[in-house]
């Protein structure tokens, strides 16, 4: 479980399937206290390590791998993945069986926003192009992603564009 807001830390905790806390809530100090860290994503790779991606100052995507079995020890330094020129407003992601974290996010303004996706390795390297999947002349929001067993990406989002017809 991860929680964050407009804070310099991201909290990490481990809870079992019955809701019993297995670890104390731990804060990962990620940047100077003046930075805004939001929209954390988490995935567990095949080595059972936590891969975390978050957005700093609404535009900079970062990566960190931690070991939940060793008191959340950082296994990699904080790594800057890429910087966006528009404001990021929400994120989602999932790790596939090949240990790639596929992330999706919404960026733009209240009048026009789009849904984007990119792939990140479990070592914190951007390995896929940033792709605009919605290409909306209006606004898109609420993007969510899932990967099938073949690694294909399936995404959904809400879109403010008027369509010629509805699905049956």
Image (cartoon, rainbow, N blue to C red):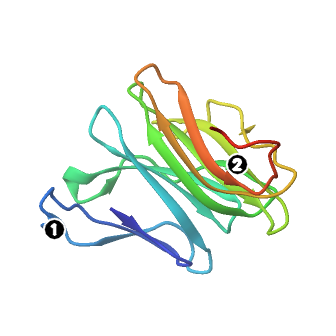
- Name the quadrant containing residue 165: top right
Dot 1 alpha-carbon crowd within 10 angstroms: few under 14, some 14 to 19, many 20 or more: few
Q: Secondary structure at mark 1?
A: loop
Q: Earlier in the sequence, mark 1 or mark 2?
A: 1
Q: Which mark is residue 21?
A: 1
Q: Nearer the viewer, residue 132 or 2?
A: 132
Q: Which mark is residue 115?
A: 2
The answer to whether marks 1 and 2 mark residues whose Cβ atoms lie closer than 8 Å is no
- Name the quadrant containing residue 12: bottom left
Q: Nearer the viewer, residue 75 or 102?
A: 102
- In percent of width and height, residue 121 lies at 51, 33
Instruction: Tell me the quarter of the image containing the C terminus.
Output: top right
- In percent of width and height, residue 137 lies at 87, 51
Report the residue at 45% width, 36% height from top: 122
- In percent of width and height, residue 95 lies at 43, 37
Identify whether 13 is placed above or below 117.
below
Dot 2 alpha-carbon crowd within 10 angstroms: few under 14, some 14 to 19, many 20 or more: many
Report the residue at 69% width, 45% height from top: 116
Determine the residue located farthest toward the right in the rendered image.
Answer: 137
**Residue 39 in the figure: left or right of residue 95:** right
- In percent of width and height, residue 107 lies at 73, 57
In front: label 1 or label 2: 2
**Residue 131 in the figure: left or right of residue 144:** right
Cα distance in 3D space between marks 1 and 2: 34 Å
Report the residue at 56% width, 44% height from top: 103
Q: Secondary structure at mark 2?
A: strand
Q: Which mark is residue 5?
A: none
Identify whether 165 is placed above or below 62.
above
């Amino acid at each position: 479980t991860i929680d964050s807001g407009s804070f310099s830390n991201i909290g990490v905790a481990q809870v079992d399937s019955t809701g019993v806390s297995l670890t104390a809530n731990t804060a990962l100090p990620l940047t100077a206290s003046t930075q805004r860290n939001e929209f954390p994503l988490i995935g567990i790779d095949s080595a059972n390590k936590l891969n975390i991606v978050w957005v700093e100052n609404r535009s900079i995507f970062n990566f960190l791998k931690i070991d939940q079995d060793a008191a959340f020890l950082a296994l990699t330094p904080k790594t800057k993945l890429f910087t966006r020129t528009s404001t990021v407003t929400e994120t989602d992601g999932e790790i596939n069986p090949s240990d790639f974290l596929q992330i999706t996010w919404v960026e733009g303004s209240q009048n026009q926003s789009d849904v984007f996706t990119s792939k990140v390795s479990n070592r914190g390297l951007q390995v896929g192009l940033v792709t605009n999947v919605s290409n909306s002349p209006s606004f898109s929001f609420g993007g969510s992603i899932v990967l099938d067993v073949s690694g294909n990406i399936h995404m959904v989002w809400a879109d403010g564009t008027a369509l010629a017809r509805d699905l049956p």
